Image: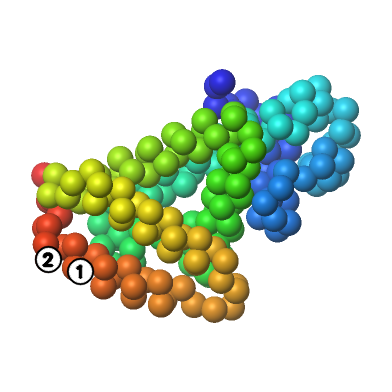
Amino acid sequence: MEPFTDFEGDHARQALEHLLVRGGLQIPSSRAIAAAANVSPATLTKWFGGRGQLARRAAYPAAYRFTYELRSQMVSGSWRRRGFVPGVDADGDTARLRLRMAWAELARHDAGVAQVFDQLLADEWAILRAAFGDGLSDLTVTAIHAYLIGIWDAVARREQSTSHEPWLTLWTRTYDDFRSRYPPPDLAS
């Protein structure tokens, strides 16, 4: 399956993402997606063959944006200060983290979405491996990854008005502990 690269139907993909972020962890009905995209359900069927195929094709750009932000934080070194907490806008909006949670849930029920989500997990793990270098075992990197997923889910579930600072403090303490045991590589070289 190729990533969603054309513009036909891109507004339907965006409508699906918007509905997932606002409405929960189930794929909305074709009628709801079509209404949000301002097209008919028949047009969605023509473009995608159904909402399941739309979900599979929409998962690619969502996963790409998430790993791009994660990789950018790793390269810039900002993760050392603010933690690997992608998907939180400057105003505290956690829409991308909530969308990641929705894709994780959808992956449990759809093999196509699961394939994309499995690649997302592998990419996240590889980014963490690169960030921490060879000083950590694969098992430790896997544990850090699981820990971060827990933080991301907690941040995504919090009320919009509450701060995600406690999670960043927790991350900082954990990172400081790992850093004292396993100094990170110099990414500038």
Q: Position of residue 129 (x, y in %)?
A: 25, 45
**Residue 148 lies in what quarter of the image?**
bottom left
Residue at the (55%, 46%) spot, across then down: 104
Q: Is residue 188 left or right of residue 82?
A: left
Q: Please tell me the numbered disc located at residue 65.
A: none
Question: Relative to 150, does residue 48 appear above or below in the rendering?
Answer: above
Report the side of 9 relative to 68 (left or right). right
Q: Crowding at label 2, few (<14), some or many (≥20) Cα neighbours within 10 Å? A: few
Residue 161 point in image, percent of width and height: 59, 78
- Residue topped by disc 1: 176
At x 55% / y 21%, what residue is drawn? 2
Q: Is residue 34 among the parts visible in the rendering?
A: no
* Rendered position, 95 above or below 68: below
Horizontal and vertical percent for residue 142?
Answer: 31, 48
| x 81%, y 26%: residue | 45
Q: Are marks 2 and 1 in contact (CB under 8 Å)?
A: yes
**Seen in the image, is 81 located left or right of residue 21?**
left
Q: Label 2 vs label 1: CA separation? A: 6 Å
Q: Secondary structure at mark 2?
A: helix
Quarter containing the N terminus:
top right
Taking the spot 43% from the left edge, 63% from the top edge, the residue there is 151
Which amino acid type is shown beneath numbered disc 1?
A: Asp
Residue type (three-letter) at the residue carrying disc 2: Ser
Label drawn at residue 180: 2
113 in relation to 157, above or below: above
Query: Crowding near pointer 1: few (<14 within 10 Å), some, many (20+)?
Result: some
Residue 151 visible in rendering: yes
